[in-house]
Amino acid sequence: MDLVLISAIVLAAFLALNIGANNSAASMATAYGAGVRTKRQAVIIIAVFALLGALIAGAPVVKTLGNGLVPSEVLSSHIGLVLIIFIIASIFVTWANVAKVPIATTHAIVCAIAGVGLYSSALHTDKFFEILIWWVAAPVVAWIINFLMAKYLYFRTLKFLAERYSEKSINRILMIMITVSGTFLAFSAGANNSANAVGPLVGLGLIGSYQGALIAGVAMGVGAILFGGRVLETVGKEITEICILRAVSVEFTGAGLILLASFSGIPVSIAEIITSGIIGFSCAQKGFGVTAKNRHVMRIAFFWIVIPFVAIAMGYGLSSLYFSYNVGDFISMNFGF
């Protein structure tokens, strides 16, 4: 197998591993914060269901990242550009994991592709702006739903349950709901974010869709098990306290939005959507001012705002260097690709 292709697959697997580590926080932080799941249980669930989501429902987003933003001909003629995309995304995701911040993984990979497309004058701007609309709308919807839930429905729901069921029955109901919502979210995360790691490779036909989903799903699972606990602590414990009912609300809201985006072929940020739901609860509980001053919220916002711009700039700049110094010719002569 070609050395450059092997390098691309290794980078894709490394990126998927870091995505799994980061998304374990987004997918399971609410239940962990509510005290329903331990760290070990949380990361095992994301490992299993991320793989299933990638295998069963990952194809539409894989297609978008494979050739929906940039024509496959642009990348297929220069595999070095694929390496650039993976390197940029891996840098940001690894940085975020070290900083224990739930990064918007999708922002890094999509904007890296956009930077390459801009330099090549081949970016499908309509698709890119459609994705940007989802990036803004989905977390806003998640925030609104969970803010309203916390403000107006939370105590009414508790009262409704208390009037009809015993405490033991209520706990059993909530445990079932949190299990269903958590696995639903983990599945949605695998369906959407697995494409971030392997979309370019699958879209170019370098590996098959099943192979790509398998590589991404397994690597995401390993990343969740090995490194997911670090970011889990930040999202689950350090923004606001989360009870089981609130966790269910955040997970179901997030999973529904993410799966809808996946069926539409839109790569979205699981971390951004789930964390926005948690912040919505915090705003309802503690007020906007207190939430805005939370140092963890500020760090998360910094990553979300800065990364897209920097990733586009790096994609554009590294593409310029790639062509200016004829790196593609060097790869072709020495590695036969």
Image: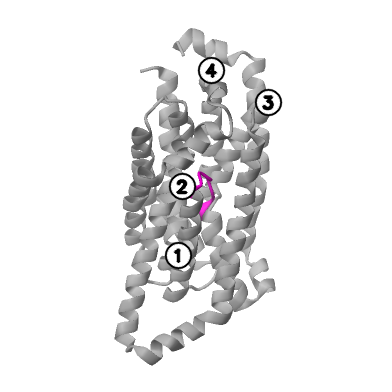
- Would you identify the image quadrant in which residue 4 lies? top left
User: Which residue appears farthest toward the bottom when viewing the image?
Assistant: 163
Q: Return the residue nearer the eye: 133 or 189.
A: 133
Who's the residue at 67% across and 16% down the image? 324
Q: Distance between the residues labelled 1 and 2?
A: 16 Å
Label 4, label 2: how many angstroms apart (C-alpha)?
27 Å
Q: How many labels does the image show?
A: 4
Amino acid marked by disc 4: Ser
Q: Which amino acid does label 3 sit on?
A: Ser
Task: Answer whether labels 4 and 1 touch (C-beta < 8 Å).
Answer: no
Q: Residue 77 carries which label?
A: 4
State the CA–CA distance, disc 2 to disc 3.
27 Å
Q: Which of marks 2 and 3 is nearer the N terminus?
A: 3
Q: Residue at the location (54% across, 58% down)?
A: 273
Instruction: Name the image quarter holding residue 117.
Output: top right
Q: Where is residue 107 in the image (x, y as percent from the top left)?
A: 58, 44
Q: For numbered disc 2, what is the local secondary structure?
A: helix
Disc 3: which residue = 121
Q: Which of marks 3 and 1 is nearer the N terminus?
A: 3
